[in-house]
Amino acid sequence: MKTFSKILQIISYISTILVVGVVLFIYIYFAYRSRNILNINFLLESPKGLVLGEEGGIFPAIIGSIYFSTTAVLIAFFPAICSAIFIKFYAKKRFRRFAHTLIENMASVPSIVLGLFSYTVFVYRLGFGRSIFSAGVALAIMILPFLERRFEKAFDEVDINLINASNNLGIHKYFMILRLVNKESFKEIVSAVLLCYGFAMGALAPMIFTGAVAYSAVPNSIFNPSMALPMHLYLLIAQGETQLDRAYATAFVELMLVLIFNIFAYMLIYKKK
């Protein structure tokens, strides 16, 4: 048994080193490939040139990605947290299992299918057109099950003794949820939002159908289309090796944005612990 435990520990160490090494290699490799492209002008200028992105920068794509993700999180947050509260504190056990099954199935739906659905409903049927709002709804549908499950997990980490004490004192359930549960799990809730924010920022498939475009100025309304980093990256790669270094620079910027949101999320968790 000791030998098996030792072997398992060694395998765990090797696997951890391998995963961390792969992630670091990706960041270092992308930074190396974009070293001649990545500068302040690349970050703050609009794309230029006869061929997409051969000159200029990606500033509209950065702002557009922030708009897409922010819209998605704002749309998904309220239904996600209300669903989590109901399933956790009000629903019966049988309904809770049924709801979890539906939510897990929803999380497994391919993002391109969600993009097609959102195009049919919001762009075509409801007439919102290709816009940040339409794409935000598509992304919100995509991140909704992940947000809901993360919120439930945050509620699960609240000390059960506090909840039992509130019940024994006759405190109304809604007051206990608003003043106790949400307060105790606030940082986990914020970290879940930040993680899903980064997740939405990198989702290309829903944006292609609903709101992302090749060329666009910084949008002044959520009912206008916009550039986005995933879309811009896809179009650069489609041009072949001529724009490959710019594609790596775009990908590195997107990776850094996602990394920043993840760092904020884990800082909140670590600070509470």
Image: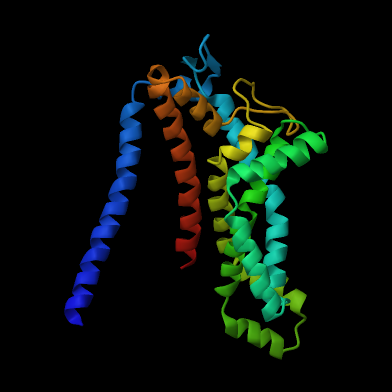
Horizontal side, residue 235 vs residue 165: left or right: left
Residue 186 visible in the picture? no
Figure quadrant of residue 82: bottom right
Query: Residue at (82%, 34%) from the top-left corner?
Result: 127
Which residue is farthest top? 50
Figure quadrant of residue 38: top left
Which residue is farthest bottom? 168
Query: Residue at (65%, 41%) from the top-left corner?
Result: 115
**x and y percentages locating residue 263 in the rendered image:** 45, 50
**Scheme of colours in the image:** rainbow
Residue 50 visible in the picture? yes
Horizontal side, residue 195 vs residue 3: left or right: right
Say if 198 sits above or below 49 in the image.
Answer: below
Say which quadrant the N terminus sits in: bottom left
Horizontal side, residue 253 vs residue 83: left or right: left
**x and y percentages locating residue 239 in the rendered image:** 46, 19
Query: Residue at (69%, 35%) from the top-left corner?
Result: 132
**x and y percentages locating residue 220 in the rendered image:** 72, 27
Number of marks present in the image shown = 0
Say if 249 sits above or below 263 in the image.
Answer: above
Front-most of residues 153 and 210: 210
Which residue is farthest right? 126
Horizontal side, residue 136 vs residue 159: left or right: right
Say if 73 sits above or below 149 in the image.
Answer: above
**x and y percentages locating residue 87 in the rendered image:** 69, 72
